[in-house]
Image (tube, coloured by chain):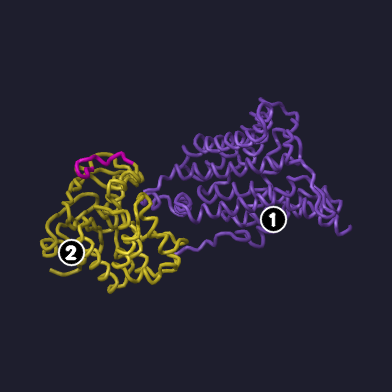
Amino acid sequence: MLTIKDLRVNYGGIEAVKGISFTVPDKSIVTLIGANGAGKSTTLRSITGLVKASGGSIQFDGTELLGLETPEIVTRGITLVPEGRRVFPDMTVIENIRIGAYLRKDDLEPDIEWVYSLFPRLKERSWQLAGTLSGGEQQMLAVARALMSHPRLLMMDEPSLGLAPLIVQDIFSIIQEINKQGVTILLIEQNANMALRIADQGYVLETGRISLSGTGKELLADESVKAAYLGKKK
Amino acid sequence: MSFTTFLQQCLTGISLGGAYALIAIGYTLVYGILRLINFAHGDIFMMAGYFMIFAMASLPWFLAIPVTLLVTVLLGVSIERVAYRPLRSAPRMSVMISAIGVSYLLQNLATYLFTALPKGYPEIPFLKRIFQIGGLSASFVTFLTPVLTLVLVYLLILLINHTKIGMAMRAVSKDYETASLMGIKINKTISFTFAVGSLLAGIGSILYFTDRMTVFPFSGSLPGLKCFVAAVFGGIGSIPGAVIGGFILGLGETALVAMGQSTFSDAFTFILLIVMLLIRPTGLFGEKTTDKV
């Protein structure tokens, strides 16, 4: 579905992504793990056109995305749940959900019902301002908002950041649920343990390069991954 | 001062305040979305005055008004396109200096094209009709201005809170990146904001100049500055703030003139600004700047 070849991105004068290649197959969950500054966020941001890549190619169902503006990329069925959630704090929950469907002109009600069934907490808080929600609820809202555009590929930048462990589990089980309903997922995480458990395929990013790849299970069992990202001694 | 005179002065003040409010909204809208003080806004207002003079020279008023408003909107949108958009990722100070540049450019362009001599503002017959209500008598425009202002503000608030483009404006004013992830076209939304601001400045210009009879190339600079003060006073970025700021300024100035202190009527505006900045730097309804990590 998504094929990235030799992607290079310069960010603030340094090469943050130094030629990475990977693929995201249709209906799968793929994760990129790695430390701070490894280039994970930059990779996602360049897929959505928020930062301009300096070389390589990003193909989505055979069309080249490089050089397209963000709204055009969103139109093609890719969406990003940004790092830090970035809900619109002065809008109500329902307005945040509706704005996720900004490009759509059809009836939104069935989809609003659908995201409310995924996140019943949001339904209770429908008229509350998004800025008054807790971190976990804001993360749920950010995911719900992203789903409203009917993405075929949903990308998430550190959905577990700053959330309590129980809530992280909730979020991850919902990610799996969304995937079962046919949405392809590209997830980046520092919480490598959680991410690799649900991933079909994982890639380890180190200073802008892919240093390891394998299925989620393979990487969980890998000694170097264990030592570097899972905090387990050999 | 008799009660009728008092009411008469209040009416004048509210009417002036209405025109100020319409212009102040332009400052506040643009600030809300670009974090830019559009110093050229007062000069757009002045240019709208000239456009009306030329439109009225060859067209009946009911055509001249829409033509003037359209040309004013085009001017506002083109200024954004040419002078601000290329600086989108530049530091904010550069855009502000560009705005000051545009302001001087328009003033000098007007001097060059139309000479510095004041030009007579055309009379729009129905606006100049004198009306009498009780002991009050004033031209129709004096009664119309505050009413029209409130109607336009109401429509604007409806637009911002209940339409898709309004939703896009609110999203863009908070967060460009996330807004574009929603599929919102940032530049289109900003152009639309300039169009709305310029349209209101155009309407304000017709109401304001109809009462003042002449336009000259610097007609926009003092009213522009005052309306900027009104926007800051009300809390820049807030539409109700700009409206209330505009009315307070209009009433305050008129009160000073009525008391025979017209020398100080301009000073009043700026004293008000200084006091407000000292007491409440974010203005009456200003955004609270809370940083949450």
Circle 2 chain: A
State which chain is coloured purple. Answer: B
Report x, y in % for residue B103: 62, 37
Residue drawn at x 21%, y 66% is A194
Residue drawn at x 52%, y 35% is B78
Position of A45 with respect to B18 (left or right) is left
> Chain A appears in which tint?
yellow
A16 in magenta: no
Q: Quadrant of residue A27?
A: bottom left
Residue A189, relative to residue A79: is it above or below?
below
In the picture, the disc for residue A198 is: 2
Circles 1 and 2 in contact, beta carbons < 8 Å = no
* Residue under label 1: B274
Position of B101 with respect to A3 (left or right) is right
Q: Secondary structure at mark 2?
A: helix
Q: Of A86 and A90, which appears nearest the observer?
A: A90
Q: Which residue is farthest right? A: B1
Report x, y in % for residue B25: 60, 49
Q: CA distance from mark 1 to mark 2?
A: 60 Å
Position of B150 with respect to A15 (left or right) is right
Report x, y in % for residue B90: 47, 42
Crowd band around label 1 with a 10 angstrom C-alpha radius: few (<14), some (14–19), many (20+): some
Q: Which residues are magenta?
A: A58-68
Q: Amino acid at mark 2?
A: Ile
Q: Amino acid at mark 1?
A: Ile
Circle 1 chain: B
